[in-house]
């Protein structure tokens, strides 16, 4: 549980880079319109690949990133640099006007700069070592985006990267609260990914968990009777997190509170112990001082394979009861973005609270689970508290509770209320 005096962490800025839209409001409008970013891959020849679909970001202009950084970094870092700048601008912050050691960066990464590394290795084997540039040593690395954001914005405080496959995208949001507790004034956090180069797509295919369907509208169907795997996608989101008191003092808009978090790890396959997703949910609720009835919507992990979907549905039913809470997901529209998806889900949950509407799960028409899935069209609602779930390959589980800001009677006119997360 959170220690007394731990700062309440509020989100004051957000951004989004997705296959259905680049930019926060473009993404949100297209999601509510039922857009689907699943399409045939175009960045390389997919002949011979059993999977030829994915969620590519097709309208991202690399000229939005300084030219010298374009050639020094991978595509996932290009997304992260742009999204970081957008989130800071959305929060009304100029890092140059703040002490560098009060600014922190925490991101998550699933597999780093895949495309950059692959190109360098191709050069090594086809030409020789003289073809490999100096930036190969850092561009592929998991912490590259954190490092580049830190350098670009003079953020000299506690910085880091979390690697927990998809679950890292939630863990890093909770890590931001830790940074506030250690004295940071502003934390830039989140994740972006670009896993659609040949090498990393081959790794996904080797897992035998990727959909091989040919119809983009029927390829990624989480919780559906026809579910046959997930499809990877590009993109993600970045968020600006500040202490509530500081945000209030500078008059920043507060989109929500990071209220509670927990992370667990599944036991090894073949053991007699059950999966630990339910435990993560229960611990996150406890950390947020919340009960199951307080949750207004769940943004599900939504893997897209029947066994994984059934396991998630079972965990939710055990906590919330049958059809006890609306459940939705962005992944059928944006693809599975590894660490980028949970960060995007947090942003989406806060937008849902802002606008009073729950986005629906696109393309799913025949649910195979006993959940209150939001299907067919967005659902008008007044969500105040949301649960976001993420599971990573090999057993990572993460659960994050976010709350909408509420008037605090101790400070008339303020808009934050909640329990700070301990990120246990």
Image: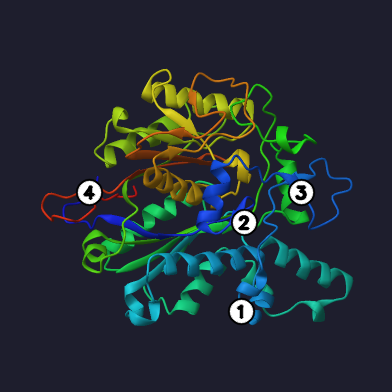
Seen at 66% across and 70% down, the residue is: 62
Q: Which residue is mark 2?
A: 111
- SS label for mark 1: loop
Spatial distance from mark 4 to mark 1, Cα to Cα? 39 Å
Residue 202 bears which disc, if any?
A: 3
Position of 15 relative to 386 (above/below): below
Residue wearing tag 4:
417
Alpha carbon separation for disc pair 3 and 4: 45 Å
Considering only order in the chain, which callout, 1 or 4, is on the residue closer to the N terminus? 1
The percent coordinates of residue 419 (x first, y second) are 24, 47
Give the image location of residue 94, x and y in percent.
Answer: 39, 76
Nearer-N-terminus badge (3/4): 3
Task: Please tell me whether mark 2 or mark 4 is closer to you in this view.
Answer: 4
Q: Residue at x 62, y 62 (%)?
A: 76
- In front here: 45 or 357? 357
Query: Are the residues at dot 3 and dot 4 in contact (C-beta closer than 8 Å)?
Result: no
Query: Which of the image's four quarters has the N terminus?
Result: top left
> Seen from this angle, which residue lies furthest left?
410
- SS class of the residue under badge 4? loop
Question: Which badge, 3 or 1, is on the more N-terminal residue?
Answer: 1
Inter-mark Cα distance, 2 to 4: 36 Å
Are the residues tagged 2 and 1 within 8 Å (C-beta)? no
Give the left or right position of residue 236, taking residue 62 as reference.
Answer: left
Q: Label 1: which residue?
A: 66
């Amino acid at each position: 549980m959170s220690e007394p005096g731990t700062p309440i962490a509020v989100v004051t800025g957000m951004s989004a880079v997705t296959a259905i839209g680049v930019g926060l409001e473009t993404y949100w409008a297209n999601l509510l319109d039922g857009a689907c970013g699943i399409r045939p891959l175009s960045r390389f020849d997919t002949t011979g690949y059993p999977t030829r679909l994915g969620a590519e970001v097709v309208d991202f202009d690399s000229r939005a990133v300084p030219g010298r950084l374009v050639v020094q970094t991978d595509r996932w870092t290009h997304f992260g640099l742009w999204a970081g700048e957008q989130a800071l601008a959305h929060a009304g912050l100029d890092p140059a006007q703040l002490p560098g050691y009060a600014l922190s960066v925490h991101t998550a990464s699933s597999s780093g700069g895949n495309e950059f590394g692959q190109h360098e290795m191709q050069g090594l084997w086809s030409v020789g070592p003289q073809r490999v540039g100096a930036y190969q040593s850092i561009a592929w690395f998991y912490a590259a985006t954190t490092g580049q954001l830190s350098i670009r914005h003079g953020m000299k405080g506690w910085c880091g990267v979390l690697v927990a496959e998809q679950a890292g995208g939630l863990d890093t949001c909770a890590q931001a609260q830790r940074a506030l507790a250690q004295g940071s004034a502003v934390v830039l956090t989140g994740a972006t990914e670009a896993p659609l180069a040949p090498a990393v797509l081959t790794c996904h295919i080797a897992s035998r968990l990727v959909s091989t369907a040919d119809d983009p509208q029927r390829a990624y169907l989480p919780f559906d009777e026809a579910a046959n795997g997930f499809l990877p996608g590009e993109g993600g989101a970045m968020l600006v997190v500040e202490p509530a008191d500081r945000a209030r003092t500078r008059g920043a808009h507060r989109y929500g509170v990071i209220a509670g978090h927990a992370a667990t790890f599944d036991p090894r396959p073949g053991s007699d112990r059950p999966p630990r997703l339910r435990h993560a949910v229960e611990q996150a609720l406890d950390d947020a001082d919340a009960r199951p009835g307080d949750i207004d919507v769940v943004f599900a992990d939504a893997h897209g394979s029947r066994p994984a979907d059934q396991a998630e549905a079972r965990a939710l039913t055990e906590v919330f009861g049958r059809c006890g809470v609306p459940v939705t997901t962005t992944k059928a529209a944006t693809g599975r973005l590894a660490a980028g998806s949970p960060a995007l889900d947090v942003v989406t949950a806060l937008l849902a609270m802002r606008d009073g509407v729950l986005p629906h799960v696109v393309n799913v028409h025949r649910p195979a689970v006993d959940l209150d899935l939001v299907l067919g069209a967005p659902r008008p609602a007044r969500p105040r508290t949301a649960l976001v779930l993420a599971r990573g390959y090999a057993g990572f589980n993460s659960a994050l509770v976010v709350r909408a800001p509420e008037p605090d009677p101790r400070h008339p006119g303020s808009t934050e209320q909640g329990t700070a997360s301990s990120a246990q």
